[in-house]
Amino acid sequence: MAIQVAVCGPRDCTPEERRNAYELGRLLAGRGAVVVCGGYTGVMEAVAQGAHEAGGTVVGVLSRADREGANPYLTVAIPTGAGEARNAIIVNSADAVIAVGGSWGTLSELALAMRRGRVPVVQLGGWRVYDEHGEVVPGIRYATGPAHALELTGLWP
Amino acid sequence: MAIQVAVCGPRDCTPEERRNAYELGRLLAGRGAVVVCGGYTGVMEAVAQGAHEAGGTVVGVLSRADREGANPYLTVAIPTGAGEARNAIIVNSADAVIAVGGSWGTLSELALAMRRGRVPVVQLGGWRVYDEHGEVVPGIRYATGPAHALELTGLWP
Amino acid sequence: MAIQVAVCGPRDCTPEERRNAYELGRLLAGRGAVVVCGGYTGVMEAVAQGAHEAGGTVVGVLSRADREGANPYLTVAIPTGAGEARNAIIVNSADAVIAVGGSWGTLSELALAMRRGRVPVVQLGGWRVYDEHGEVVPGIRYATGPAHALELTGLWP
Amino acid sequence: MAIQVAVCGPRDCTPEERRNAYELGRLLAGRGAVVVCGGYTGVMEAVAQGAHEAGGTVVGVLSRADREGANPYLTVAIPTGAGEARNAIIVNSADAVIAVGGSWGTLSELALAMRRGRVPVVQLGGWRVYDEHGEVVPGIRYATGPAHALELTGLWP
């Protein structure tokens, strides 16, 4: 079975985040990875479009119980009907989690991925988490661009 | 996006159920449908093998939070970590639900599909549900073989 | 911790089913059991009312992500946001499952309870499941009335 | 129906976090609120003990499908079998969310609560989230002690 990489990020994203997500999609499809995402707009749509246009397989794990609002680049749609609890399913499905940009939904996915603790978690832009002593909570890897994000997953040494 | 068909059935199945599921997988892949199944052994593995060998895409919506025990024919694995609640996700993902053989897990999927009420539900063998008056509860379509099951979905008129 | 008993049944129920569910609620509260139900109308509301009026604790495990449509007799509401997948949560929460009346949603709960296989499953009226050979699939206990249903759980010998 | 307040926090907590959670449980029970928590050890156990000893109702929304490992202070146990996806259920169940201390699991609950956006979210100690510009992401209310946390929910003006 192919490597599966989850790419997370906000619905409302900046043009730069959109470009980064699209490029990530292209790169992941080029490596033969299945892209798992939330299936809607913004970063989710950009990574799906990138992977789709590069001939890759894209899975949208949807919060709704039907396909309404899903972006048109999905190979497979999984309408979980689980609401935001589907973020845990996205994380469980991944050999690595990459977040592009910041939002509360995106942060919940990063936190669930770190809580799970089995796979590399990479951020490209977005928010930072500090502990009570004012220090960055360790564990997340910070990338400077899409290619660097792929490198930081360690999946293609 | 491609048509998605869920094929359900017991882990412990008869040789005939296995043959029927395998043939269903081949036929569905031949029509370009994505096969969605529970991802483990028995009917789930047979339909996945049939679709995989015919070049199709197979999604395993797993009850566990990891891929342990998944059959080797899946294109995509979705480890929901939701236990048997994942049966509702399988049903939500389907443009038609086909059950091969009978078990309590399979019956829960048929019942959830009928409860949802939006898509054709087809049985090939398996159990029957009767109401208080001793009459079959209507709604499920009964097929005599794999090709007939596809026909009864009404998806390829 | 108190014994927890799930009582399942259709939204659209007969007056007799409503009376049976109400009486079950009273009896269960009288034994000190926590009643777990789906939290909405019909059988769910009747059992909640019965338990509430007898001073018992009633938990409504809701399909929606908010409390809209919940009946007014719940002590605690759990808005799962999981849709019909919440039926698996109701079943997991129970030391015994009792179904009053028949519907596809109710059957999914019975099937999930039998699939789980750890606790007594009792029906009061409702549908019957037959195997390929025309025989009732064994395992479910059939009660003739609310008091008999409690007796068949075996929880209060 | 009573007000329901979710109290979140790490399994591995400091003695101070344990004292704060216990005190929160006592205060919430004293106000007649139902306490919703994750049901296991650490902060979850301390808040449950506090509420239980003050005569309150405590619901443990468990990640496992059974009650193994649940703390002994729960009035009701809901074994979701949903893994960490149950964090979304805890958040959906709450009229206010209070977090005591920091961990990735706790952060996922805070993030899901902020993503939901309908109820006050309060932190007592724990981690901080900063955006790309180095500023605290607004929305969470920071308390200096258990009584202050209750006050910041705004539920008892």
Image: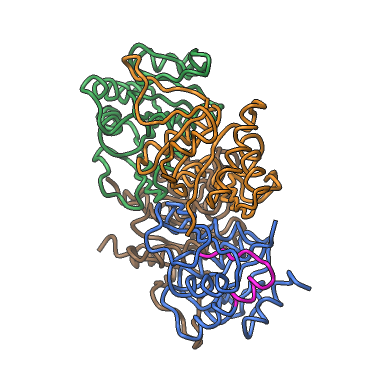
Chain colours: A blue, B orange, C green, D brown
Where does the image place residue C146, in percent across and percent down from the top left? 33, 17
Where does the image place residue A11, in percent across and percent down from the top left? 43, 73
Q: Quadrant of the C terminus of chain B?
A: top left
Determine if the magenta segment contains residue B46: no
Location of residue C150 by image quarter: top left
The residue positioned 50% from the left and 46% from the top of the image is B5
Residue placed furthest toward the right = A157
Drawn side of residue D147 relative to residue A151, left or right: left
Residue placed furthest toward the front = B157
The residue positioned 51% from the left and 73% from the top of the image is A49
Q: B117 or A86, which lies in front?
A: B117
Determine if the magenta segment contains residue A28: yes
Q: B72 or A61, which lies in front?
A: B72
Q: D29 or C44, which lies in front?
A: C44
Residue D40 visible from this viewpoint = no
The residue positioned 54% from the left and 26% from the top of the image is B102
Asked if residue D82 is positioned above or below residue D20 in the image, the reply reads above
Drawn side of residue D14 relative to residue D4, left or right: right
Where does the image place residue A12, in percent across and percent down from the top left? 41, 77
Q: C146 or B48, which lies in front?
A: B48
Where does the image place residue B117, in percent across and percent down from the top left? 35, 40
Asked if residue D124 is positioned above or below residue B40 in the image, the reply reads below
The residue segment tinted magenta is A24-37
The residue positioned 46% from the left and 15% from the top of the image is C141
